[in-house]
Amino acid sequence: MRIRRFRPEDTDAVVALWTAAGLTRPWNDPRKDIARKASVQPELFVVAEDDSGNLVGSVMAGYDGHRGWLNYLAASPGARGLGVGRALVEHAEQALHGLGCPKVSLQVRAGNQDAVDFYRHLGYTIDDTVDLGKRLIAD
């Protein structure tokens, strides 16, 4: 497996990966999310390829000077359990640490216990917070 920076020609494969992983939602256009990330810290958007060059994982990371964030961590269903997710998280953590980031945060959809268990296994803990959101641009 190889982790590398996202390239525009990866877009279709990334959207297919996110769809297969159950990450897409009707109110978030994945192509717009990709385009937005490509314009803000694009070096923190990486994909994983298997030995045949097939895209098997992705993660978007970001750092705002206070916290790092992980978004769209995905491993293809056929690659789960092979260390793809762990490798992507570790890659993102190292990149964020290199920027001076003191803490990484992420959000997991309510009811996704498998994702919570995955992150807990990697040393993440549940923060006692309430997520609030406000859409500024309707997709």
Image (cartoon, helix red, strand yellow):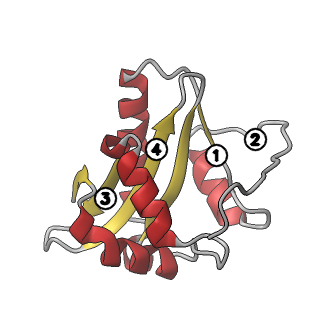
Pointer 3: residues within 10 angstroms few (<14), some, or many (20+)?
many
Q: Position of residue 51 (x, y in %)?
A: 14, 68
Q: Give the residue at mark 4.
A: 61
Amino acid type shown at disc 4 = Ala
Q: Quadrant of the N terminus?
A: bottom left
Query: Residue 124: which quarter of the image?
Result: top right
Sequence-wise, the earlier of marks 3 and 2 is 3
Q: CA distance from mark 1 to mark 4?
A: 18 Å
Task: Answer above or below: position of 79 versus 109.
Answer: below
Q: Residue at x 49, y 62 (%)?
A: 33
- The residue drawn where x is 60% and y is 49% is 119
- Residue that badge 2 annotates: 126
Structural crowding at the residue carrying mark 4, measured as other residues with C-alpha within 10 Å and reported as few (<14), some (14–19) or many (≥20): many
Classify mark 3: helix, strand or loop.
Answer: strand
- Give the mark, 3 or 1, whose residue is nearer the N terminus: 3
Give the foreground label among 3 and 2. Answer: 3
Looking at marks 3 and 4 on the same chain, the residue that comes earlier in the sequence is marked by 3
Camera-nearest residue between 73 and 87: 73
Is residue 117 in sight in this rendering?
yes
Q: Is residue 124 left or right of residue 81?
A: right
Q: Which residue is mark 3?
A: 47
Label 3–label 4 contact, CB within 8 A: no
Do the residues bearing badges 2 and 1 touch, measured as CB atoms within 8 Å? yes
Which amino acid, mark 2? Ile
**Residue on which the image places disc 1:** 120
